[in-house]
Image (tube, helix red, strand yellow):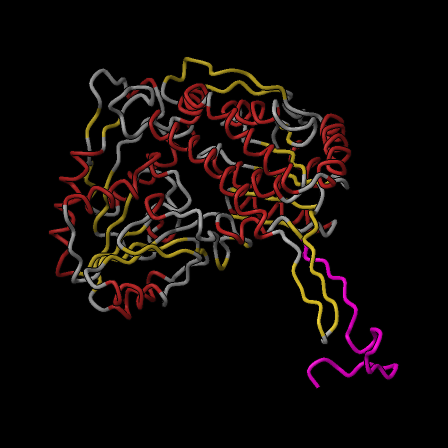
Amino acid sequence: MTTAPTSHTRENPARVDESVGTVEFATPAAVDRTVRRAALAQVEWAARPLEERVALVRQAADHVEKHLDEIAGLVARETGKVLGDSRGESAFAVAVLRHYANRAPELLREQGHDDERGRLVVRHRPFGVVGAITPWNAPIILAVLKVAPALVSGNTIVVKPSPLAPFGIQRFLELAAEVLPAGVVDVVQGDVETVTALVEHPGISRVAFTGGDTAGRAIASLAGRSLTPSVLELGGNDAAILLDDVALTDADAERLVMAAFATSGQVCMAIKRLYVHSSRLDEVVAQMRAAAERVLLVGDPLAPDATVGPVVNRASRERLEALVQSCREAGNQVIEIGGVAEGTDLDRGHFVRPVLVLGADDSDVVVAQEQFGPVLPIQAFDEVDEVVVRANAGDLGLGASVWSADEERAFAVAARLEAGFTFVNTHNRTGMSLLAPFGGVKRSGWGREYGDEGLMEYVQPCVIHAPGAFREGGAGSGAAAYPGT
């Protein structure tokens, strides 16, 4: 019988002989205690006036903000994400806390009417205790996109981070908890056993998950057994389409490169497939190679000049190395791009050099499946109708982008793509907005984060209604007419 692990020591993926730290895994009994504590806290938290809740969330944001350098250092060392990006992610998470604290009074106010039609009140009721399972590639923001809307709307939340990135988000939420009432936000560390105990717990009223397709299917199945509603943001195989009229400046080319290779390509909404009109293919490849020399520098995440760190672990590195080798063996052109920071020992960590792949077919693994690493296939197309069909191939539909000098043309093509979020003349994080709901179609998940929709995922509209026909002075006859007749 296999014994479940009781702890996990996280290596630094840039220096695998260095340990970032060890976390103890929560047993099912520990998960039970945490969820019960959260359930008790939720009753009081939901009973607080909304203005008190949002004020406390703002105070928590202020408190966490004082410690961003500490949090960013932990994220860089545990994930391999370069320090500047790690700090940017942490700062953006603080902005998310403030954003939902600002939006909650408007979105959660009572709605309805009181007139000749009757008296109708729509209230927004929290679910209760939210169980959040979060990934390693953006551990702070992808947790806070669940924490912030859950808390302002009166839920409490228990977060289960990835064992590959347990420390940064633990510290972030510990700091927030120093301001918030006890039990309102908590963390349980662990692996599959901990996830199962959390999702199946009868005290969990909503599940929120970001991660891969395989884990998403398992979590949806667990939640479905008890009819626990869920929000799932799964993977993507994002297509970027450069039309024949695209005006690609040096800045555009740099943005295009970073949209594919930031965080070593380990981003759900990174460009995974690049389609370029055949008349522009050679030109675009040359521009991307030149841009990569300017903006891609592989190195230790703590080095001030590095822009690309290692991939997250040995398994990812070996998988990506095998993928690149298979492209070479298939006769594809594999072009290494970017540089290596001075003093970087690539053999000491899980480093993978960024590459462009030319000549792959649509059916090849490097195109048909999400690479989740610094490997980008570039393919030519001739007609818009053709490229739309190719971009829509597959069962994922998270993000996409269209690049054109004609914005109206770009929007028209974008409207034909099967994606939950389509960028125009940018892609990945440079195109995100706190105001825009983000999530996938097809098998890239359900539910939304960001935007007002991201907050409304954490409340249930509950109605109180006195029809006008049956109020004093009404013309009720004992049987209401069927609505709409």
Q: Which residue is drawn at 59% across and 35% down?
A: 55
In the picture, the quarter occupied by the C terminus is bottom right
Q: Residue at x 42, y 50 (%)?
A: 236
Measured from the top left, where is residue 204 in percent x and y?
72, 41
The residue lying furthest to the front in this view is: 473
Compared with 225, 388 (above or below) is below
Q: In this view, does 335 lie to the left or right of 424?
A: left
Q: Nearer the viewer, residue 44 or 393?
A: 44
Q: Which of 120 and 277 is in front in this view?
A: 120
Measured from the top left, where is residue 467 in percent x and y?
78, 73
Measured from the top left, where is residue 32 in percent x and y?
75, 31
Q: In this view, does 423 lie to the left or right of 202?
A: left
Would you say residue 463 sits in the magenta stretch? yes
* Magenta-colored span: 460-485
**Labels in figure, total:** 0
In the picture, the quarter occupied by the N terminus is top right
* Quadrant of the rendered image containing residue 192: top right
Q: Which residue is drawn at 77% across and 66% down?
A: 465
* Quadrant of the rendered image containing residue 158: top right
The residue lying furthest to the bottom in this view is: 485
Q: Residue at x 65, y 42 (%)?
A: 50
Compared with 480, 371 (above or below) is above
Would you say residue 443 sits in the magenta stretch? no
The residue lying furthest to the top in this view is: 18
* Quadrant of the rendered image containing residue 414: bottom left
Measured from the top left, where is residue 328 in percent x and y?
24, 42
